[in-house]
Structures are given as structure tokens and as C-alpha cells.
Image (cartoon, rainbow, N blue to C red):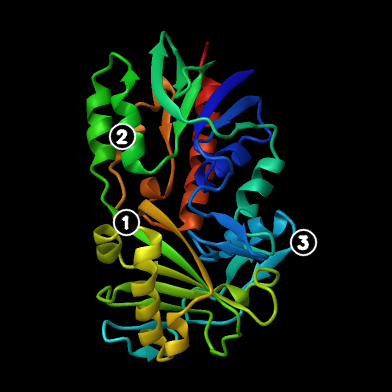
Amino acid sequence: MTSLCVVGAGAAGAGAAYALRNTDVEATVLEKSRGVCGRAATRRRHGCRYDHGANYVKDPDERTTRLIRELGDDGLVDVEEPVWTFDRRGRITEGDDRDDHKFTWTEGLTQLAKRLFARTDADVRTATRVAALDREGDRWSVTDTDGDGHGPFDALLLTPPAPQTAALLTDTRWDDARLPRLREAVGSVPYRTIRSYLLHYPFEIDRPWYALVNVDREHDVGWLSREECKPSHVPDGESLLVVQMSPAWSTAHYDDPLDESVGTVAETVATLLDDPSFAEPDWYDDQGWRYALPDDGVSDVVHEAEDAGLFFAGDWVAGEGRVHAALWNGIEQGERVGEHLATSVF
């Protein structure tokens, strides 16, 4: 048996574990939060269930649809309503046919990682924040923020957003000339910051679209979607808007108290939708994503240390800030790990 430590239980980490499900590799997954699926997150409140990070899994090709259906059709949701667009002036235009299939589940988008992990023997340890990495001989060890050690492992796969991965590489004890190059390459990946607001209303919204996306990136709102378009997410007769503010607005107002900033957001939504009733939600919620979406990928430098059992995966490795990109990059990197461990002599 060989062993792998996966840092992060998001789509990439779950994909890597899934890729190794029929191998002799023992996978241990360390996740800092209390749940899985990372930025593809689901929350429950006041009888509502909502995907407050990524909103769905896009279907870019047949393999994604095939994998999702292999995970089980029970509770699977394919949002039928279209995505429309708007510009910096708030002019709404009928959709551009993007994302014909928009997959989630009645129990939320976290089902993606839950269902992938359920098909593996991976040991998933949540509420475990990794603080430092250590290379001793030909094996890796991990220390968490509570001072507990994990390992040793034959290989290590890092999947957090690039800035957090770069910070881990800073706290890595490994006397190898490749480490500074890796740290620099990973740390150079640019990211967009997004603050999501959830606005609930005790009435139904009659609109012909599921979501609106700002195509020129010059509006304070970047994305707005209707969570009630997903079965079992919002009770009948109610509406819940997922409002993702633009990176510029989100960066400027990232630390503003929710109770002070939500009024501005609701007024902006009311203006965009040309309806003053949206200025007064009856309850609201928010989530800040400091490292929401990579604006670029990373160089091939990240593959240089694979002979030492050090691997990287995520949307930032794939170079596309999409759930499916993180998922497939995780699967591909998991397969690379499996090939490496199968041919290594320990």
C-alpha cells in the first residue's frame, strides 16, 4: 500500500480521491472547514437551501454529464431557465445560450464532493487546517494548526486556492532548489475577490430567466440568480436571490459589516431589476470569497516536483475558474499521482 495526503476537500480534492478509488493508494483528505466541496458550497437557513459560492456545475462536454449521472440521478437538478446578460448601465438582454446544462442537487452543490467521496475509501478529516509541510527522506508529513501531525505519506497533493497554497509552501521544510520556484509560480496566480449576498423575499418573482450576468464587468453586480429555480431550495411563494458583487466592489467593501452594506446591495438590485420592492429583503446572509476565481493559470513549473511526490490541483492549475475545471484537473492529477506511486520504489 502507498499513501497520499490531499490538502483540501473541494472539487479538485474529491476528484483526485475518486480517480484513485480502484487503486492501492490510501488517501487521507485534510479539510479546514466542517464540510466538503470548497467554494461549491451550500448553506441552509429559514427553510431555504442555497448554493452561495459556485451556483452549479457547467456541462462543457459529454464526460461531465456522464460522470454526474453516474453519481446518481436521485435529487439531480438541471436548471432549465436561461442565463441572461446585462451591461454597466443595467440594460438586460436575452441570454447568450451559455451553460445549456446547469447541474446541482436538491440537497445542494456540496453533493458533488459528497457523492464522489462516497465512492472511495478516502479518510476525510474535516475541521483540520494544515499549517506546515515537512519532507523527511522520501516521505511527506503534515502538521495542522492544533499542532497534530499527519503522515508520513508517499505523496502530497495541494488543492487550496493558489495564494493559500503558496503560503503553505512558505511553511514547508524541504531543502530543495525547486521549492522557491514553485512558491513563486504558485504565488503569482491572480485572483478575483467576490462577496456574495443572499436576499430573501416573502413573495414570488416572475421573471423569464434563472440568472443575470454582467458581460462588460463594469457594473457593481457581477451575477444575480434566483435560487427558487432549483427544486427543493426555496419554499413555494418565496424568493431568494444570490447576488455576487463585482470584484472591484467586493474588494472595496469586503470587510464592511453585513448590516451596513446589505442596504446598498439591495438598492442596487432594486435598480437593476427596476422594482423598488427588492430594496427590502426580509432576511439576508452573506459570504466573502477572498480567493473566488483565478484570472489565469499557473506555469508548468508546478509539475517539476512530481518525482518527489509533490502535486498540485485545482481550477488555478487548470487555468479556468469553473467547478468542472477543478473537478477534472483533480481527476487528472489523481491519475498522475497513481502512476507515480505505482512506479516508485519505497
Q: Point out the frontmost of discs 1 and 3.
A: 1
The amino acid type found where label 1 is placed reads Thr
The residue nearer to you, when weighing 1 against 174, is: 174
Question: Which structural element holds mark 3?
Answer: loop
Q: Residue at coordinates 54% horizontally, 89% vertically from top-left?
A: 208
On the image, numbered disc 1 is attached to which residue?
193
The amino acid type found where label 3 is placed reads Asp
The amino acid type found where label 2 is placed reads Ala
On the image, numbered disc 2 is attached to which residue?
166
Q: CA distance from mark 1 to mark 3?
A: 34 Å
First in sequence: mark 2 vs mark 1: 2
First in sequence: mark 2 vs mark 3: 3
- Residue 150 left/right relative to 316: right
Which image quadrant: the N terminus? top right
Question: Residue 306 appears at what percent x and percent y?
Answer: 40, 27
The residue nearer to you, when weighing 13 against 272, is: 272
Circle 1 packing at 10 Å, graded few (<14), some (14-19), many (20+), is: many
Q: Are marks 2 and 3 in contact (CB under 8 Å)?
A: no
Question: Residue 272 appears at what percent x and percent y?
Answer: 37, 85
Question: Residue 86 appears at what percent x and percent y?
Answer: 35, 84
Question: Which structural element holds mark 2?
Answer: helix
Q: Is residue 272 above or below residue 116?
A: below
Asked if residue 85 shows in the view, the reply is yes
Question: Which structural element holds mark 1?
Answer: strand
Q: Is residue 215 above or below residue 197?
A: below
